[in-house]
Image: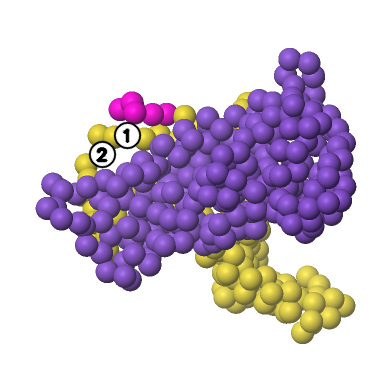
Chain colours: A purple, B yellow
Amino acid sequence: MREVAFKILRFDPEKDSKPHWESYRVELEPTDRVLDGLEAIKGSVDGSLSLRRSCAHGVCGSDAMLINGRNRLACKVLVKNVKQPIAIEPMRGFKVIKDLIVDMEGFFSKYRQVSPYLIEAGPAPEKERLQSPEERERFDDTTKCILCGACTTSCPSFWADPDYIGPAAIVQAHRFIFDSRDAGKEKRLKIMNEKEGVWRCRTVFNCVEACPRGINVTRAIAEVKQALVRGKV
Amino acid sequence: MEAKLRRGGVSMDRQEPLTTSYGSRVKPSGGIELTAWLFMRISGIVLLVLALGHLFIMHVFNSVHVIDYDFVARRYVKIFWRGYDLTMLWLAMIHGLNGMRTLVDDYLHPPARGIVVKGMYVVGGLFLILGTWVIMAFRSP
């Protein structure tokens, strides 16, 4: 065990007019994760610290936050791998509700707009909907998204224009647009082709850097642009 | 979910007919943003050739000391060079204006956005007219 220093951007809407930094020190193993540190702070130093977490194993996407200036999942970063004091901030571009908890309603509203579910062309087949390995491979990368918001909140286009549908929603649209079993491409491509759709992407590549699942987000966006330009998937 | 969801400037119409499948032609393509995006790519590549050509002709192959009125007048006897300059002027102006428009779209909000964009179009349009007029109306002695 050794002492690990944190500084956390705190904000309590009932008390603070603007966010402020607070420093903490907790005993941790070097192989502990940043999330363990935050829970140690919440558990033994300051119970008012508010954060989201659920599975704590990089699958649910609840604990995306800025760790030393980069969008990361707190459950996937070991304390020994980051410089101290470990600076923790809420994701940028979303309204902060309290401390590290941000309002993701707009984010999920955009997610819902791309109809992130299979749209059938006709009646359901008796058994499963068959697909070749190649057809499945076509959209494999974008199936990995866990909707943590790390890509969208690392995107300067989104910071500047919160109406931009954002990389996460485009990734979700890509996942169905390039699925051979899906019949809702026109509808999704129409949304992608709007002013606040894919054309807002300036290929900054921050989303690729931020994605904790290693999705090549910018490539997915480019493929959607290409589908629009060529008029075919 | 509601039949029509509109938020953040992106609309969703659930009444769209579902007719496409993998590998088919999908509509809609086209639209002003798509056209603008494609224009930026194509004009960018063409401008790279034209502008580099211009740079080399004016500053590498010919010294700035030999470039004078007569040099330009001799060039403009040939319709080719007028076409070259005219193409470069139009592509560069529209490319630049559209680039500025996207920047303004990103960082300004109504009503400032509309005012600045329209102002840019007016200034850009004047430059285009002036430049075109000079290239077209120039009389080589």
Please indicate whether residue A205 sits to the left or right of residue B58 in the image.
left
Nearer to us in this view, B118 or B76? B118
Q: In terms of secondary structure, where does tag 1 sit?
A: strand
Identity of the residue drawn at 74% across and 25% down: A48
Q: Quadrant of residue A139?
A: bottom left
Q: Disc 1 sits on a residue from what chain? A: B
Are the residues at dot 1 and dot 2 in contact (C-beta closer than 8 Å)?
yes
Identity of the residue drawn at 15% across and 48% down: A124
Q: Which residue is mark 2?
A: B16
Nearer to us in this view, B110 or B27? B27
**B140 part of magenta stretch:** no
Residue B43 visible: yes
Please indicate whether residue A51 sits to the left or right of residue A58 in the image.
right
Please indicate whether residue B85 sits to the left or right of residue A114 in the image.
right
Question: Which residues fall within the magenta stretch?
Answer: B1-6
Identity of the residue drawn at 54% across and 61% down: A216
Q: Quadrant of residue B88?
A: bottom right
Q: Few, some or many C-alpha atoms within 10 Å of disc 2 (few <14, some 14-19, many ≥20)?
A: few
What residue occupies the far front of the structure in this picture? Answer: A1
